[in-house]
């Protein structure tokens, strides 16, 4: 096993700010369902798979729909989202992330991604970051999404890393819970009070220094 800490990144809200595009896409879906999705409720959708997001929305809206309509809505939401992110590039990487990853690679740290998004590889390629990752776990790789730790367990296995030697960067409560369940070091990114369950919280990624983990 590698003794250097392995860094596992979430994607949306940590590496790039595509979360606003998710919010806009879900708001469009909710409008068609006569439900007004608030920014507060949207916080509960962060880090959660697309199908679980729709499950939550239908529950909040007190709606029941057929499985066919459910799948059609998932497809429509994804198409809305993909259209919104079609023009992203390396300029959309959150400040501080690229320098941190590049420095970590120079110091022989393994870099992994675990995102609930099924578009993770597509987005990493658009950001010109794909080659930096030693392992990529996305929504296509797991059966159970966050807060289940399945994806983090898989990322640790793919990098031959002990979970206790992994550092997770997350902006969602679900992701922090998942990392905590298997004793990974969890780093919350953002202002949400729900991130206080992380081992440490930074408001912005650019505040983080590689030396913090030596």
Image (cartoon, grey):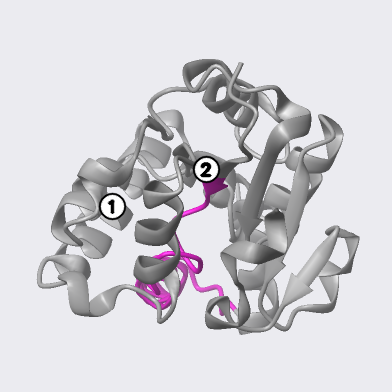
Residue drawn at the location 72% of the way across and 83% of the way down: 191
Quadrant of the snapshot with the N terminus: top right
Q: Which residue is mark 1?
A: 78
Q: Which residues are magenta?
A: 8-37
Neighbour tally class for label 2: few under 14, some 14-19, many 20 plus, Cα within 10 Å: some
Examine the structure image and report whether residue 11 is included in the region drawn in magenta. yes
Up the image or down, 179 lies above or below 155; here it is below
Q: Is residue 121 left or right of residue 214?
A: left
Q: Residue furthest right?
A: 197
Residue drawn at the location 66% of the way across and 78% of the way down: 190
Marks 1 and 2 sit apart, C-alpha to C-alpha, by 12 Å
- Residue 44 found in image quarter: bottom right
Asked if one can make out residue 22 in the rendered structure from this viewpoint, the answer is: no
Residue drawn at the location 49% of the way across and 41% of the way down: 109
Give percent across and percent down for residue 24: 38, 77
Neighbour tally class for label 1: few under 14, some 14-19, many 20 plus, Cα within 10 Å: some
> Which mark is on residue 49?
2
Q: Is residue 87 left or right of residue 199?
A: left
Give percent across and percent down for residue 211: 64, 64
- Residue 38 found in image quarter: bottom right
Examine the structure image and report whether residue 176 is included in the region drawn in magenta. no
């Amino acid at each position: 096993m590698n003794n250097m800490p392995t860094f596992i990144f979430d994607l949306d809200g940590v590496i790039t700010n595509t979360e606003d595009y998710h919010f806009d896409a879900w708001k469009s879906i909710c409008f068609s369902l006569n439900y007004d999705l608030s920014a507060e409720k949207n916080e509960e959708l962060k880090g959660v798979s697309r199908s679980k997001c729709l499950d939550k929305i239908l529950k909040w809206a007190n709606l029941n729909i057929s499985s066919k309509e459910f799948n059609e809505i998932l497809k429509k939401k994804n198409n809305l989202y993909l259209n919104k992110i079609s023009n992203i590039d390396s300029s959309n990487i959150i400040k501080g992330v690229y320098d941190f990853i590049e420095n970590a690679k120079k110091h022989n740290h393994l870099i992994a991604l675990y995102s609930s998004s099924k578009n993770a590889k597509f987005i990493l390629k658009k950001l010109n970051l794909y080659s930096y990752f030693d392992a990529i776990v996305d929504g296509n790789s797991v059966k159970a999404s966050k807060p289940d730790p399945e994806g983090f367990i898989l990322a640790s296995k793919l990098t031959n890393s002990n979970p206790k030697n992994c550092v997770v960067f997350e902006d969602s409560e679900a992701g922090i819970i998942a990392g905590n369940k298997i004793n990974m070091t969890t780093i919350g990114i953002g202002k949400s009070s729900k991130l206080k369950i992380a081992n440490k919280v930074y408001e912005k990624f650019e505040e983080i220094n590689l030396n913090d983990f030596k």
